[in-house]
Amino acid sequence: MAKKKIAVIGGGSSGLCTIKCCLDDGLEPTCFERSEDIGGLWRFKVGLTSIYKSVIINTSKEMMCFSDFPIPDEFPNYMHNSKIMEYFRMYADHFDLLKYIRFKTTVVSVTKRPDFSSTGQWDVVTESEGKQESAVFDGVMVCSGHHTNAHLPLDSFPGIEKFKGRYYHSRDYKSPQEFSEKRVIVIGIGNSGGDLAVELSHEADQVFLSTRRGAWVLNRVEEQGYPVDIVLTTRLKAFFKQVLTTSMVNQWAENRLNARFNHAHYGLSQHPTINDDLPNRIISGKVLVKPNIREFTETGAIFEDGTREEDIDAVFFATGYSFSFPFLQDCVKVVENQVSLYKFIFPPHLEKPTLAFIGLVQPLGAIMPIAELQSRLATQVFKGLIRLPTESDMMADITQKKDEMSKRYVKSPRHTIQVDYVEYMDELACLAGVKPNLLSLFLTDPKLAMEVFFGPCTPYQYRLRGPGKWSGARKAILTQRERIIKPLKTRPVGDYTHHTSVPYLFKIVGAVALFCLLLLLAVMIIKATDRHRW
Ligand code: FAD
Ligand code: NAP
């Protein structure tokens, strides 16, 4: 039988792993990338709207790698964007992906063919060097990214039209030099706002960081010097989140974050932002945290608490991004960053499930392994090996997710595609048949089970079994801590660590006992909740 032809739109990190998943599953991918290179927004280029020169990723290498291609031992845990590009190029070379990509080719439209209800096929029109071409595909995987359209809410800022200084979106920021000795306002305290405020404050005379809700500030480096996502993204913690109440979990997290610095004293608190230097810049007065701006004047801004700052030279709107899919026209509707997709991947209303969105999530964690697992699931669906539920069941799942999000997050365009890393990965993995079976692991391979349950939930866990199983997964999990430590060992030092003399067997028995105890606790809590409900 002829291989199914799949159009992959975009050659960023999501597009790359999607091409590979198509190949792994015997599909025939053609990737269309409008620029001349891979890497999507991670490819820094002056003059090109992408990232700023200094961007260091905030997800660590063991948590952000593709699941069957660990990042080399010697690479730093938090990589500069140039290093990230190096990794993506290694991945593309290793799996020989470049030959499937048509660069400088923009997808301009994707429409159902007249016989779509029986074939599920699409007409894909592309444009390259002014010439349009059309081709038929059996499936389409949209990997066009969701951090490309600048969200510039000028309507919310009266007086901006009379402001005589310059204003920009954070997307247009490249480096701080031209703001030397200037007075700058940064609006928004997502990761962009935090990064810009810190970097600008080294050159500018004064930086004002305006936020309407504040943020919880996390450091990249956590307990014992491990990356924060390595410490926090574990199955054990995900389990606690399930059995404890939201307020208990929030209390634990807030106490932990406030132990480093009291967020209320620093004018902060709310959505998590990763920034190592922000508290230092605030305590040294180089960054002053301000409330939301009520209005701009010709020379400055008046804030909601009535205070005003004058002689402002520049304003950065670090107000995030919005997404759209202009090439899909009416097929998928996006309203205020809201889109209805089953598991954030599949439009529920199609007669045939031959369209998938990859990487269209905002995780508390890395996007790359999520995009990869989404692609693995989508290729199985395209091949007919996995059937999606009925439209009404998919809609019920979508509505439930939207309700959960609205209960948990403040209503904002940044909170429409929010997912928790472990929970969401496990959900996809269940559907794809690749979720690790902890009980059988504890019985057959306790050493591995311990690391899977208590250690970081690294992407390799989803290659231990099922379709796409990788023989290197076990070793990758058992050596992940070595890869974390390796780039730090650049000078020989004595071993000052205190080794416990608890024999390994005792550790395993202890772990199994703890596991059973937790299980018992969960059952008791669930029973108590049920009783309460009746
Ligand atoms: P992109 O990287 O945006 O790639 C999309 C590609 O599609 C582009 O190459 C584009 O040219 C192409 N394309 C779009 N439309 C078309 C079309 N019509 N035809 C042909 N080609 C098209 N995520 C993390 O996991 N960790 C981080 O630390 C992190 N840091 C970030 C820092 C910044 C400053 C920003 C803005 C985002 C960050 N992200 C981070 C999120 C980021 O979106 C992902 O890391 C990643 O880039 C997503 O890859 P992607 O391939 O889905 O999208
Ligand atoms: P973001 O996370 O969406 O944050 C936008 C900020 O702007 C929020 O503080 C938001 O406040 C505020 N905002 C939006 N509209 C506003 C309005 N009308 N008035 C006042 N404030 C408004 O956007 P981002 O910081 O650009 O981040 C985008 C993505 O890039 C994220 O995934 C982030 O993790 C990533 N990123 C990573 C790095 C890194 O790895 N180093 C650096 C930068 C960005 P509310 O919360 O109140 O809505």
Image (cartoon, rainbow, N blue to C red):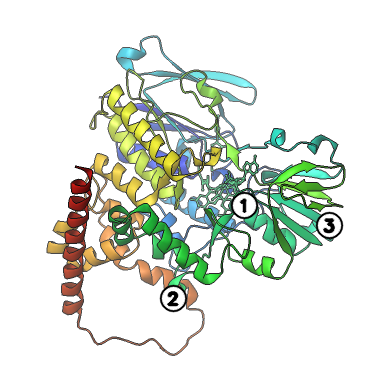
Amino acid tagged 2: Gln
Q: What element carries label 1?
A: loop
Q: Specify the amino acid type for callout 1.
A: Ile
Work out how far the residue at label 2 is from the one at label 3, CA to CA, in angstroms: 39 Å
Relative to the observer, which residue lies in front, 439 or 46? 439
**Separation of marks 2 and 1 at Cα, in angstroms:** 27 Å
The residue beneath circle 3 is 182
Within 8 Å: ligand 2 and the Cβ of disc 3?
Answer: no
Q: Which is nearer the N-term, disc 2 or disc 1?
A: 1
Q: Which label sits on residue 224?
A: 2
Measure the C-alpha gap from mark 1 to mark 3: 20 Å
Label 2: how many Cα within 10 Å (few below 14, some 14–19, many 20+)? few
Numbered label attached to residue 189: 1
Question: Which image quadrant is residue 273 in?
Answer: bottom right
Q: Where is residue 20 in the image (x, y as percent from the top left)?
A: 38, 42
The residue drawn where x is 35% and y is 62% is 456
